[in-house]
Image (cartoon, grey):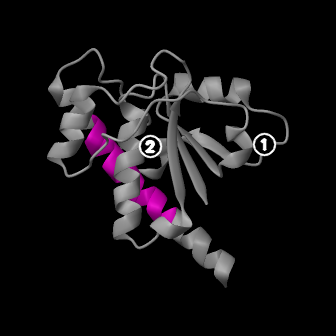
Amino acid sequence: MRVLFVCLGNICRSPTAEGVFRQQLQAAGLSDGVDVDSCGIAAWHVGKAPDPRTREAALRRGVDLGSLRARQLSADDFFRFDYLLAMDQANLAALHEQRPVGCPAHVGLFLDFGDHAEREVPDPYYGGEQGFDEVLDLVDAASRGLVEEIRQRLEAQTS
């Protein structure tokens, strides 16, 4: 199973989702069966580490994002991943525009797996520190839901 988290620049929301989701997979004993990555629609930050505020907020919750580096979405991603999960409607629209014919992956909003009323992870880049904590809260809840879905899919594959 392969999961790709997608935001605009790949320095705030999608690397946060990647780190939190990896941590939850490990806690659930599923990390060996699931590959996780993140990317951006735009190429502005390719090769850069996540925003320092993103890294600091994640570290306060025990999630180390220091080794992650931004990359841009590629056409191959649509066939390499089982899930391509956008952080907001604009990113989802961009995914649908670029989605090749015959792409078998689930392409949708990440927060559809959460238990919050929100459907989009807000971009904290231009806001204050509380925005990065809000992203972590939303990502944590959606990650729990996605871990459960993947657990069920993996169990179905082995039975």
Task: Say if 32 sits above or below 5 in the image.
Answer: below
Q: Nearer the viewer, mark 1 or mark 2?
A: 1
Image quarter in which the C terminus is found? bottom right
Q: Amino acid at mark 2?
A: Leu
Tell whether 48 sits left or right of 101.
left
Q: Which is nearer the eye, 2 or 143?
A: 2
Whole-percent x and y of residue 74? 67, 30
Q: Residues within 10 Å of mark 2 (few under 14, many from 20)?
A: many
Could you tell me how far apart the alpha carbons at marks 1 and 2 are, in whole angstroms?
21 Å
Q: Is residue 139 magenta?
A: yes
Q: What residue would you read off at disc 1?
A: 103
Q: What residue would you read off at disc 2?
A: 111
Image quarter in which the N terminus is found? bottom right
Tell whether 48 sits left or right of 150.
left
Tell whether 133 sits left or right of 31.
left
Whole-percent x and y of residue 69? 43, 33
Q: Quadrant of residue 45?
A: top left
* Farthest residue, direction right: 101
* Farthest residue, direction bottom: 159
Q: Which is nearer the eye, 33 or 98?
A: 33
Name the magenta segment's main secondary structure: helix
Look at the image and give the residue range highlighted in magenta: 135-149
Q: Quadrant of residue 79?
A: top right
Look at the numbered disc 2 and give the secondary structure of its residue.
helix
x 40%, y 55%: residue = 22
x 18%, y 49%: residue = 61
Q: Quadrant of residue 41?
A: top right
Whole-percent x and y of residue 106? 66, 47
